[in-house]
Amino acid sequence: MTAMPTGAPAELPLRPGRAWTMVERNLMIYRHTWPVLLAEIFEPMLYLLAFGVGVGLLVGDVPGLGASISYPQFVAPALLATAAMNGAMNETTFNMYGKLTTDKTYESILTTPMSVRSVALGEVFWALVRGAIVSTVFLVVVSIFGLADLPGALLVIPSALLIGFAFAAVGLLTVTFLRSWQDFQLIQLVMLPMFLFATTFFPLSVYPRPVQVFVEVLPLYHSVELVRAAFLGTGSGYPAIAVIYLAVLGIVALAIAVRRLEGTLRP
């Protein structure tokens, strides 16, 4: 038997084709677990029925948006942004942590020509595919009920992809810090308040100014406002700010996550 070379193996150059191999692998697996995607679609639908329609009957139009916007129209884009966030975060935290620890999936994958960077990018690509599927189906459904105006609302799809990229990269970075399954409670401790306060159900103007400043820092706030601008045709120059914020967040988080994964998977 030939002896293995000593020292750390040289990292292979990043090739998008190899990263896409991870997407193909996940597609093959999800042929048997596709109900998971249905759950991601139905969850925002249930919130829309409970809050958008139920509470909307009591609220009426939402003031302060420069147009007559019903409460379901206000809530629907926020729920789509939240679905894109949750899908990306679940894929690169919960699912990836299982592959890293319990299943040891990446140890086998890295015996092939795949590099750590290709694996990381492939998992992010897959999160984007999931986000695109969920966002497209959700958009079609809410359009049927008259809550989104096509074709202008089609800008929601690239917006959801950008949100998915940003949160997939953040999730990828987060998973490198997890010590056990119990740490997922800390993720929920951040995600749930962000979901409740990031203008998902209430406009920013209802909060006192100190709370507004805090909300404006949250990535989900920028995600919601970006999708809402596409849904409603509002926001003037704000969508550019949201795009820059989410793109920078995703790129920085991905760069740091890849470096940390290289230290974990290539000790």
Image (cartoon, rainbow, N blue to C red):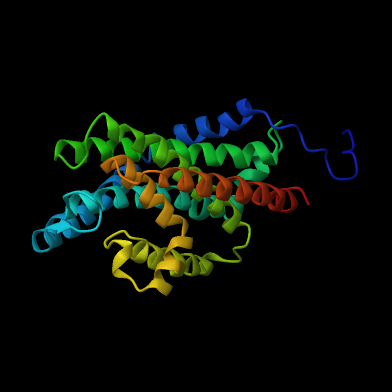
Give whichever of 134, 60 is nearer the camera.
Answer: 60
Q: Is residue 225 left or right of residue 169?
A: left
Instruction: Please tell me how many numbered marks the rendered image carries.
Output: 0
Rendering coords of residue 160 (x, y %):
40, 41
- Quadrant of the image for the N terminus? top right
Give the residue drawn at x 76%, y 33%: 12
Inspect this view and state whether residue 130 appears: no
Q: Is residue 115 left or right of residue 137?
A: right
Residue drawn at (65%, 51%) of the image: 257
Answer yes or no: is residue 222 visible.
yes
Residue at the image point whose x is 33% and y is 44% from the top: 229
Whole-percent x, y for residue 149 in the image: 21, 35
Side of 252 relative to 265 (left or right): left
Q: Nearer the viewer, residue 103 or 150?
A: 150
Reply above or below: 75 against 197: above
Q: Position of residue 253 (x, y in %)?
A: 61, 51
Dividing the picture into quadrants, the one containing residue 136 is top left
Q: Residue at x 57, y 29 (%)?
A: 21
In the displayed structure, 241 sits above or below 213; it is above
Q: Residue furthest left?
A: 57
Vertical placement of 263 versus 155: above or below?
A: below
Q: Nearer the viewer, residue 75 or 182?
A: 75
Q: Position of residue 85 (x, y in %)?
A: 42, 51
